[in-house]
Image (cartoon, helix red, strand yellow):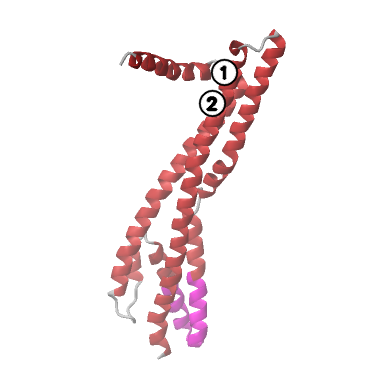
């Protein structure tokens, strides 16, 4: 009980000294922290945006699949696709339906050729839609790989400043060494704080994108089996 006030005072002093240390840091250290802050904020914005978008797409895909599977195999699915504009599978199905209609109107292609042409059209549509979902995700990988090195650069700069102060003042006391070391540690922490969430978020989003790729591949097969089975017959 006697030590509690002392612990609180020491902890409060440490917390109060960190902002003051940042404000009193050198221009280079502030630039490093500013770069890391911008990268961290943008990474969180990308992560939040992509997570929300992927959740909306997954919900739309589930609703579209329920509607699509209630259709007869010979039924035109364009209306159902247009009713689910946020669905990735709906846009892939729409590309397949348009390709089938186009080649059916020509009446010159064999069923096998129509199958292959439709599959390629759906694969291209899936690749384009997946690429749109992947937009900005690469920045998370960049942040995760670069931020620790940026923080390390700030660390080296802080240590170097400490040695320069020792040489200039001819003293290795704690008062001389502490500011530079503290700046170095803050830069290290800032680099890790920016990198760790970015790496975790990137791995999670890449896993979700991989699931979208598997889902579009399976749906393409299901769509062609439903539609081209009837045509081949």
Residue at the spot 49% in from the left edge and 75% down from the top edge: 119
Q: Position of residue 201 (x, y in %)?
A: 46, 47
User: Callout 2: helix, strand or loop?
Assistant: helix
Whether tag 2 and tag 1 are in contact, CB under 8 A, the answer is yes
Callout count: 2
Which residue lies under the disc numbered 2?
186
Q: Residue furthest bottom?
A: 233
Residue at the spot 60% in from the left edge and 40% down from the top edge: 146
Q: Which corner quadrant of the image does residue 63 belong to?
A: bottom left
Q: Is residue 108 magenta?
A: yes
**Badge 2, how many Cα within 10 Å: few under 14, some, many 20+?**
many
Which residue lies under the disc numbered 1?
25
Q: Position of residue 147 (x, y in %)?
A: 57, 37
Quadrant for the C terminus, please. bottom left
Q: Residue furthest front?
A: 2
Query: In the image shown, does 4 or 199 lie closer to the viewer?
Result: 4
Decide if residue 83 is in sight here: no
Q: Position of residue 173 (x, y in %)?
A: 62, 11
Q: Choose mark 2 or mark 1, whichever is in front.
A: 2
Q: Position of residue 222 (x, y in %)?
A: 40, 76
Magenta part, dominant SS? helix
Residue range of the region highlighted in magenta in the rendering:
96-122
Answer with left or right where residue 39 lies relative to residue 54.
right
Query: In the image shown, does 125 or 156 lie closer to the viewer?
Result: 156
When the figure is inspected, residue 112 is found, relative to residue 119, above or below; the finding is below
Q: Which corner quadrant of the image does residue 45 belong to?
A: top left
């Amino acid at each position: 009980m006697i030590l509690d006030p002392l612990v609180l005072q020491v902890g409060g002093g440490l917390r109060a000294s960190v902002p003051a240390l940042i404000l009193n840091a050198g221009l280079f250290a502030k630039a490093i922290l500013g770069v890391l802050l911008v990268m961290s904020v943008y990474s969180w914005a990308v992560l939040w945006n992509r997570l929300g978008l992927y959740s909306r797409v997954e919900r739309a895909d589930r609703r579209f699949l329920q509607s699509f599977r209630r259709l007869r195999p010979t039924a035109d699915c364009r209306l159902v696709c247009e009713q689910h504009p946020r669905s990735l599978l709906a846009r892939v199905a729409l590309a397949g339906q348009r390709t089938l209609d186009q080649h059916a109107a020509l009446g010159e292609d064999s069923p096998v050729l129509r199958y292959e042409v439709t599959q390629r059209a759906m694969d291209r549509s899936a690749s384009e839609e997946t690429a749109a979902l992947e937009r900005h995700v690469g920045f998370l990988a960049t942040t995760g790989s670069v931020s620790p090195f940026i923080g390390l650069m700030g660390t080296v700069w802080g240590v170097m400043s400490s040695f320069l102060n020792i040489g200039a003042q001819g003293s290795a006391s704690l008062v001389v060494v502490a500011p530079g070391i503290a700046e170095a540690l803050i830069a290290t922490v800032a680099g890790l704080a920016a990198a760790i969430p970015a790496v975790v978020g990137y791995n999670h989003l890449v896993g979700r994108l991989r699931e979208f790729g598997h889902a579009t591949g399976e749906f393409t097969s299901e769509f062609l089996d439903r539609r081209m089975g009837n045509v081949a017959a």
